[in-house]
Image (spheres, grey):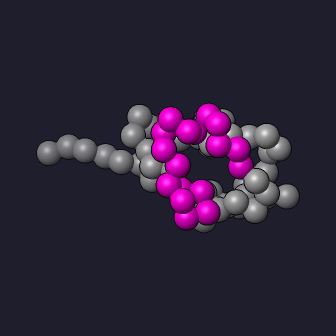
Amino acid sequence: MSITVNGKRVDFIKDESVSRLLKRMRFLFPLVVVKVNGQIIPRELFTGTMLHEGAIIEVIHLTSGG
């Protein structure tokens, strides 16, 4: 059982939220955009959004500077 994160297959963990996945994958950047199966997940829903087997997740790290 697996999910895809940024094009890479990783183990699916039952009852894992977006928030926990970000910690497990070490996406600890303060500014990220997360899409699950093509749908943007608002930051305030990271903890309550559970992942399902076969999900396709995209994590985009936003940077700023000048």
The quarter of the displayed image where residue 9 is located: bottom right
Q: Residue furthest left?
A: 66
For the C terminus, the quadrant is top left
Q: Quadrant of the N terminus?
A: bottom right
Q: Is 36 positioned to the left or the right of 42 in the image?
A: right
Q: Which residues are magenta?
A: 35-51
Residue 11 locus on image (x, y percent): 78, 52
- Asked whether the viewer can see residue 58, the reply is no
Which of the two residues, 63 or 50, is positioned nearer the viewer here? 50
Task: Specify whether residue 15 is in view.
Answer: yes
Left or right: 9 with respect to 7? right
* The quarter of the displayed image where residue 16 is located: top right
**Seen in the image, is 29 located left or right of residue 39?**
left
Instruction: Name the residue located 75 percent from the left edge and 62 percent from the top edge.
Output: 54
Which residue corresponds to the image point at 70% horizontal and 60% vertical from the top-left?
55
Place of residue 51 in the rendered image (x, y in percent of width and height, measured from the top left): 71, 49
* Residue at x-position 80% and y-position 45%: 13
Point out residue 30 in the picture as x, y percentages from the top left corner: 41, 34
Name the image quarter holding residue 24: top right
- What residue sits 79% from the left and 40% below the top? 15
Q: Nearer the viewer, residue 44 or 34?
A: 44
Q: Where residue 17 sits: x, y (%)?
A: 68, 40
Q: Is residue 66 magenta?
A: no
Count of numbered circles in the view = 0
